[in-house]
């Protein structure tokens, strides 16, 4: 059986959880925070989560794991279509991560953990997020899903990237990121109405209690 390493507050971990839920693949979870212990580095070379242990070995990097799951469990494909259509989904996945998730992450310390982020970083992040959402708006379909009529890996990565990016944009810049991509608000609402997404949100809320204690133990 697959083993998923990570914790339920992690947005990347939740991307994999949602993919597994959609595909109805059984797995067990080992709850752990990112760490640099020799034991975990032996599984996840950067010490990050998520990591997925398969019968053949461990995989890291969320987009790689998503693609592996789609190859290993082809029912309910997350990268449907021909070679070009699949590539378009990968393009959206990459854009959501590079231009929303990663810039927003630079401001997570201030928005989620009460640690000041310097003004230059904030200026860069504001610009990057606006460019990112405008870029996505140019190539996403929102009909109703990012890549068209079917829910794909792009929606999974968008859901758990744009939600945090929107909190960063709202909290620090007073910007509604979703206003800048017509269709995005409706897509988020559609995704958030799913039972599997609701369950992941509930798990995240529950796990956040322990996570806050864990973070507080460092201060
Ligand atoms: N590129 C990685 C990013 C995963 C990631 O950043 N995970 C966070 C938790 S949400 C983490 O492990 N952070 C610890 C660290 O950066 O060392 C992926 O796609 O899986």
Image: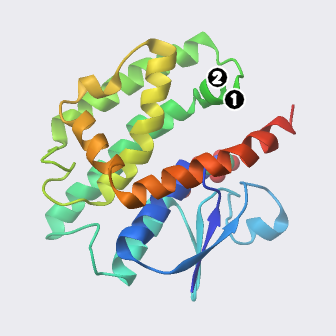
Q: Quadrant of the C terminus?
A: top right
Residue 116: percent from left, percent from top: 69, 17
Q: Which mark is residue 113?
A: 1
Q: Is residue 45 left or right of residue 170?
A: right
Q: Check disc 2: other Cα within 10 Å, few if <14, some if 14-19, many if 20+.
A: some
Disc 2 to disc 1: CB gap under 8 Å:
yes
The structure residue drawn at horizontal position 68% and vertical position 64%, both measured from the top left corner, is: 45
In the rendered structure, the answer to whether residue 174 lies left or right of residue 178 reads right
Colour style of the rendered protein structure = rainbow
Secondary-structure class at tag 2:
helix
| Any part of residue 18 in sight | yes
Total marks placed: 2
Residue 141 badge: none
Q: Is residue 77 above or below residue 101?
A: below
Q: Where on the picture, by quarter, is residue 1?
A: bottom right
Q: Residue at x 54, y 51 (%)?
A: 202
> Residue at (12%, 47%) from the top-left corner?
143
- Residue 4 place in picture, x, y as percent: 60, 70
Side of 108 where 193 appears, left or right: left
Residue 94 appears in the picture as rendered: no
Residue 174 in percent (x, y) is at 43, 12
Going 70% across and 71% down the picture, which residue do you hit?
Answer: 43
Q: Secondary structure at mark 1?
A: helix
User: 169 or 84, which lies in front?
Assistant: 169
Query: Rounded to the nearest whole Å, what is the CA distance between mark 2 and mark 1?
Result: 6 Å
Q: Which quarter of the picture shows residue 156?
A: bottom left
Q: Is residue 45 left or right of residue 213?
A: left
- Relative to 177, residue 30 above or below: below
The picture places residue 175, in percent across and down from the top left corner, at 38, 16
Residue carrying label 2: 110
Mark 1 Cα within 10 Å, few/some/many (few <14, many 20+)? few
């Amino acid at each position: 059986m697959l083993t998923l390493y990570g914790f339920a507050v992690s947005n990347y971990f939740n991307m994999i959880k949602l993919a597994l839920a959609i595909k109805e693949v059984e797995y067990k979870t080992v709850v752990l925070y990112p760490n640099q212990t020799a034991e975990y580095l032996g599984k996840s070379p950067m010490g990050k989560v998520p990591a997925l242990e398969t019968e053949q070995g461990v995989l890291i990097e969320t987009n790689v794991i998503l693609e592996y799951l789609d190859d290993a469990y082809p029912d309910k494909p997350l990268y449907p279509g021909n070679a070009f259509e699949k590539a378009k989904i990968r393009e959206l996945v990459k854009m959501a991560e590079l231009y929303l998730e990663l810039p927003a992450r630079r401001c997570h310390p201030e928005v989620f953990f009460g640690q000041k982020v310097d003004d230059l970083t904030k200026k860069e992040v504001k610009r990057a997020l606006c460019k990112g959402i405008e870029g996505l708006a140019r190539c996403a379909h929102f009909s109703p899903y990012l890549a068209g009529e079917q829910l794909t890996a792009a929606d999974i990565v968008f859901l758990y990237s744009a939600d945090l990016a929107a909190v960063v944009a709202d909290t620090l810049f007073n910007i509604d990121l979703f206003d800048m991509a017509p269709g995005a608000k409706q897509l988020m609402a559609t995704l958030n109405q799913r039972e599997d997404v609701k369950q992941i949100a509930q798990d995240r809320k529950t796990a956040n209690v322990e996570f806050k204690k864990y973070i507080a133990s460092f201060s």
